[in-house]
Amino acid sequence: MVPVGGISCCLSAAALYLLGRSSGRDADVLRSVTRVDQLKDLAQLLDAATKVLPTLIVAATGRVGSDTPINCEYSGLRGVIVEQTAEQHFLKHNDAGSWIQDSALMLSMCKEVPWYLDDTTARVHIVGARGATGLVLTVGSEVFEESGRSLVRGTLDYLQGLKMLGVKRIERLLPTGTPLTVVGEAVRDDIGAIRIQRPHKGPFYVSDKPIDQLIANLGKWSRWYKCASLGLTVFGVYLLTKHAFQYFMERRRHWEMRKRVLAAAAKRAGKEEEGVNGKVENTSDATKKDKMMPDLCVICLEQEYNAVFIPCGHMCCCMACSSHLTNCPLCRRRNDQVLRTFRH
């Protein structure tokens, strides 16, 4: 039997270790990025850096602003990124005869307008923020509209095993005026304006946390992943060692019982072909030994075995001896059932 538990633990430990290394690398990269105290200094830094570096990764802070903000339909707030979802909630009839609550997504849409960071000294446009790490949208409104279906429609839904409860509409947004920290590549566009975007290689963060807190969180998660990886590794090795030990002991018991049966058969038949004084002679030919193996019960060594243990499937005892056993003599698994077999 394959030790699935031990292998799964070791694979999970490897995955957590890789996550820990990735978080640690991101923390090191964030420590090395150029921090912009005032956005007005970014143009000078960009001009100086492009002469020696192909890309400039910066960390800038400011408040969200836009010349064309979106007016939210339900909350009345103004934002630059707005997500709207609508979920249909209902009760459905399951096979057990009871009603359980479930939901299905009806609508999911997102709008984004050009926006920038503003710290009163300058403005820097942000591009592709929806795909950045750390972006969390604020829940602007959450409304539940009860179902108002007609009697005919409600009856049809009931016959299909459904009871409509209503629609839940959630509106999430990035409001204007929100203080943000953006880490990304600073570039100039075609008209000379500065923007921050996702770099070809490197971190891209849009978060409401300061960069020092981002670095601390990444370091904490890196340590947590590595500790969890170490714990799973130890547990996985323990499971694999336990499985190997049990397999070794099972094989050892199997060979010891095999020797006992062969010795009892030799003594019973009065033959000396299997060994002297009840000891079995070792033979390198496994096929020959299987043919010489008598069908004796490993407990009484007198009756032929005719009982199969369930669920392990071993057949090594007679029905009389198996009735007194709760575990299989070969693998030590607990017996749920014993079946009698017939050879003819």
Image (cartoon, rainbow, N blue to C red):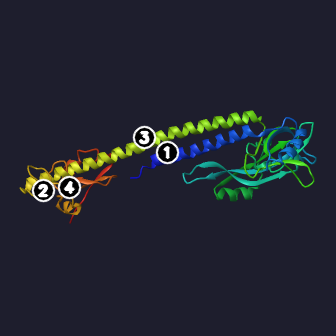
Is disc 3 placed on a helix, strand or loop?
helix
Task: Give the number of the disc on residue 293.
Answer: none
Where is mark 2, residue-wise? 274
The alpha-carbon separation of the residues under discs 1 and 3 comes to 10 Å
Instruction: Indicate which disc, 2 or 4, sits on the residue closer to the N terminus.
Output: 2
Where is mark 1, residue-wise? 9
Q: Amino acid at mark 1?
A: Cys
Where is mark 3, residue-wise? 238
The alpha-carbon separation of the residues under discs 3 and 2 comes to 40 Å
Instruction: Indicate which disc, 3 or 2, sits on the residue closer to the N terminus.
Output: 3
Residue 209 x/y as whole percent: 76, 35
Q: Amino acid at mark 4?
A: Tyr
The alpha-carbon separation of the residues under discs 1 and 4 comes to 40 Å
Crowd band around label 4 with a 10 angstrom C-alpha radius: few (<14), some (14–19), many (20+): many
Contact, CB < 8 Å: mark 3 with mark 2? no
- Quadrant the C terminus occupies: bottom left
Where is mark 4, residue-wise? 305
Between 128 and 90, the residue placed more toward the observer is 128
Contact, CB < 8 Å: mark 1 with mark 3? no
> Which residue corresponds to the image point at 13% horizontal and 51% vertical from the top-left?
263
> Which residue corresponds to the image point at 66% horizontal and 42% vertical from the top-left?
25
Instruction: Indicate which disc, 3 or 4, sits on the residue closer to the N terminus.
Output: 3
The alpha-carbon separation of the residues under discs 2 and 4 comes to 20 Å
Residue 241 x/y as whole percent: 39, 43
Is disc 4 placed on a helix, strand or loop?
loop
Of the residues tagged 2 and 4, which is closer to the observer? 2
Is disc 1 placed on a helix, strand or loop?
helix
